[in-house]
Image (spheres, grey):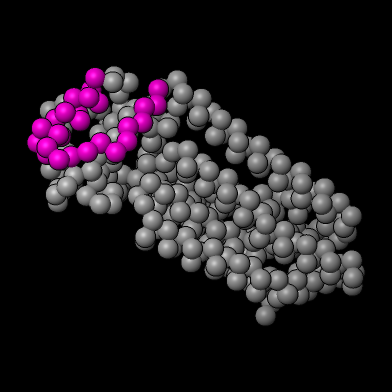
Amino acid sequence: MKIIEKRKYSFLFSALLIIISIFFLSAWGLKLGIDFTGGVLTEIQFKQEVSKDEVVDSVKDLGLSSLLVQPAENHSFIVRYQSENGKINSDLEKTLEEKYPEAETLRTEFVSSLVSSELKRNAIYAIIASIIGVTWYIAWAFRKISYPINSWKYGLGAVLALVHDIIITLGVFAILGHLYGVEVGIPFVAALLTIFGYSVNDTIVIFDRIRENLLRFGAGKDFEGTINKSIRESIARSLNTSLTVIFVLLAIIFFGGATIKYFALALLIGIFFGTYSSIFVATAFVAELWKKDQK
């Protein structure tokens, strides 16, 4: 099974996914939650069966900006809107309790626009710092095997796989935000950083096997053969590890609460493509760099 020799197909597939993701990100963008825009989140539970349209109709006269109503479990709804006025939230709760006397407010969260701007800035810094740290670490870890390819190129392959995974995840959430009103907040950033760690871990498992085989057998003129051998020796471990995590995330998505469902979904997308990119993007990219060096 010579996976690396078929890398042009994986490159085409990944390029197509990235182009589609960038298109939707450019056209629609991400639907930012109150963590990044500022506003109020209120979760209200009803004793009887109430539809989303009924909740929206009940509060429409309040003139709430960027109103978003999402169903949650046990007859409850999460109501989000942009406002820094505490009186408006009191009016919302009063309006719903007048129409539904047994309604109960489970939680209310306020985020100011100043705090949300700082959170947005810190999230960007965290992602940039993670990318730099990953590149430096892999270049350092592989410093002893600069032949047949420079050690820093392993780091470049890992970062390319990371960018691949993140862009696709962002693209999926751009679609979900446009079609279903799914918002992204700090939990989504935490999911992206987790994807960073998982994707790098998966990539390093294969890179480390390549390093062991190079130190044991040497590179010779068949570096692609060494890469193929390393993939065959480590692919079962990577797939088994990823599948166990994916099964847990699927359980969270279908049986967990609404507050963590999209966090788990982001992880699921990132881990799935992270497993794919470790072999078909990061490792294949290293092989392609070596081939160009030979020419």
Measured as percent of width and height from the top left, residue 238 is found at: 64, 68
- Residue 56: name its quadrant: top left
- Residue 79: name its quadrant: top left
Indicate yes or no whether the magenta region holds residue 101.
yes
Indicate yes or no whether the magenta region holds residue 52.
no
Q: Say whether residue 152 is visible.
A: no
Name which residue lies at 39% across and 36% down: 32
Q: Say whether residue 2 is visible.
A: yes
Measured as percent of width and height from the top left, residue 43 is found at: 28, 39
Q: Residue farthest to the left?
A: 99
Vertical side of 177 occupied by 284: above or below: below
In this rendering, would 166 be left or right of 97? Answer: right
Image quarter of the N terminus:
bottom right
Name which residue lies at 39% across and 52% down: 261
Front-most of residues 272 and 167: 272
Q: Residue farthest to the front?
A: 102
In this rendering, would 233 be left or right of 105? Answer: right
Vertical side of 230 occupied by 144: above or below: above
Measured as percent of width and height from the top left, residue 106 is found at: 29, 38
Front-most of residues 293 and 249: 249
Vertical side of 22 occupied by 226: above or below: below
Front-most of residues 52 and 26: 52
Name which residue lies at 38% across and 56% down: 256
In this rendering, would 175 be left or right of 153? Answer: left
Image quarter of the C terminus:
bottom right
Image: magenta residue range: 87-112
